[in-house]
Image (cartoon, helix red, strand yellow):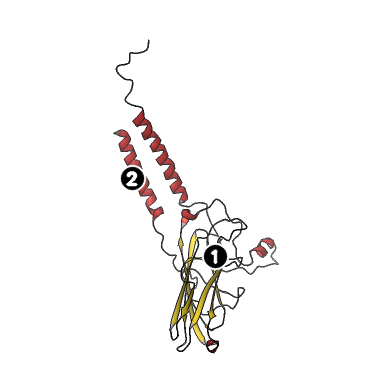
């Protein structure tokens, strides 16, 4: 009975401790520093407009233009990029595509979501979405895993008639993410985040005459700050449960003592 009570109390305590860690995280709140939403997009990777997660960005352009935005993503986050293109009143069939690239300008595959869609003739808008894989803290050099740093969003039309080329369109982009936490943690850490100018900054440390053009956004506590993740909680839970199972197994198999029909040893 004592073993049963101990096991019950331990399991109840572990369940209460693990509850918050296992909860489904909510999307990140708006991180806009000045409260103003960008109203234009860049035309290349170098001129991409910076946006924060949770921030809504709009832009005006023409069919055939390449529209670029950039946003930060850190270890353990799973970004979701959503875009809406407002089309002119009269147009033919058009196919729009949403591409996401990492800090090394490698195109990242979408886990799910409609990253390319065709708008029928006369449609007022088309909506696109791309859910990326969870950002990892470390990866092999040959791997294409998403790593912490700057990510680029490119929105463009890939199929339309010649008569629709150059017509005015409006675009709206928003990036959110979920914090996956220890479920995607790996044993390793990236030395530097993949952000523009990070190599220049490393070389210019201690030299006031050199300045690097770095992305102005990022975490207040630094990239990939801290070593803690909820994976440590589940590791501790597993260790405690294994110990309790060993104690319970020993208590069940040891019996009640020496059998009564066995004479004592002299």
Question: Between tags 1 and 2, which lies in front?
Answer: 2
Instruction: Indicate the position of residue 150 as horizontal and vertical percent values.
Output: 57, 66
Q: Is residue 167 visible?
A: yes
Q: Is residue 202 above or below residue 171?
A: above
Whole-percent x and y of residue 2?
30, 33
Residue at coordinates 44% horizontally, 44% vertically from top-left?
236
In the image, taking residue 258 as reference, residue 184 lies left or right, namely right
Residue at horizontal 49%, vertical 61%? 77
Q: Quadrant of the C terminus?
A: top left
Which residue is found at the position 49% from the left and 82% from the top?
94
Residue 216 position within the rendered picture, expressed as x and y whole percent measured from the top left: 57, 69
**Residue 56 showing in the rendered view:** no
What residue sits right under mark 1 in the picture? Answer: 218
Question: In the visual, does 212 lie left or right of 231?
Answer: right
Few, some or many C-alpha atoms within 10 Å of disc 2 (few <14, some 14-19, many ≥20)? few
Residue 30: quadrant of the picture: bottom left
Q: What secondary structure is marked by label 1?
A: loop
Q: Earlier in the sequence, mark 1 or mark 2?
A: 2
Residue at the top extreme? Answer: 266
Kindly identify the residue that appears in the image at 38 percent across and 37 percent down: 245
Give the structural element (helix, strand or loop) at label 2.
Answer: helix
How crowded is the residue under tag 1: few (<14 C-alpha within 10 Å), some, or many (20+)?
Answer: some
Q: Which residue is mark 2?
A: 12
Position of the N terminus by quadrant: top left
């Amino acid at each position: 009975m004592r073993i049963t009570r101990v096991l019950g109390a331990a399991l109840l305590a572990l369940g209460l401790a693990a509850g918050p860690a296992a909860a489904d995280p909510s999307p990140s709140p708006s991180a806009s520093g000045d409260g103003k939403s960008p109203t234009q997009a860049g035309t290349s990777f170098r001129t991409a407009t910076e946006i924060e997660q949770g921030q809504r960005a709009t832009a005006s352009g023409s069919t055939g233009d390449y529209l670029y935005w950039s946003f930060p993503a850190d270890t353990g986050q799973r970004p979701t990029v959503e875009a809406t293109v407002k089309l002119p009143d009269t147009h033919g069939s058009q196919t729009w595509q949403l591409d996401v690239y990492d800090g090394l300008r490698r195109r990242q595959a979408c886990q799910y979501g409609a990253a390319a869609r065709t708008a029928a003739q006369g449609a007022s808008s088309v909506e696109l979405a791309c859910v990326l894989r969870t950002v990892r803290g470390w990866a092999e050099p040959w791997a294409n895993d998403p790593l912490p740093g700057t990510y680029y969003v490119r929105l463009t039309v890939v199929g339309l008639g010649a008569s629709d080329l150059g017509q005015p369109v409006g675009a709206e982009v928003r990036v959110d993410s979920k914090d996956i936490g220890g479920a995607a943690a790996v044993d390793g850490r990236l030395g530097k985040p993949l952000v523009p100018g990070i190599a220049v900054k490393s070389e210019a440390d201690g030299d006031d005459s050199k300045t690097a053009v770095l992305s102005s956004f990022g975490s207040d506590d630094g990239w990939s700050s801290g070593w803690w993740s909820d994976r440590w909680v589940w590791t501790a839970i597993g260790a405690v449960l294994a110990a309790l199972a060993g104690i319970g197994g020993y208590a069940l198999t040891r019996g009640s003592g020496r059998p009564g029909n066995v004479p004592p040893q002299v």
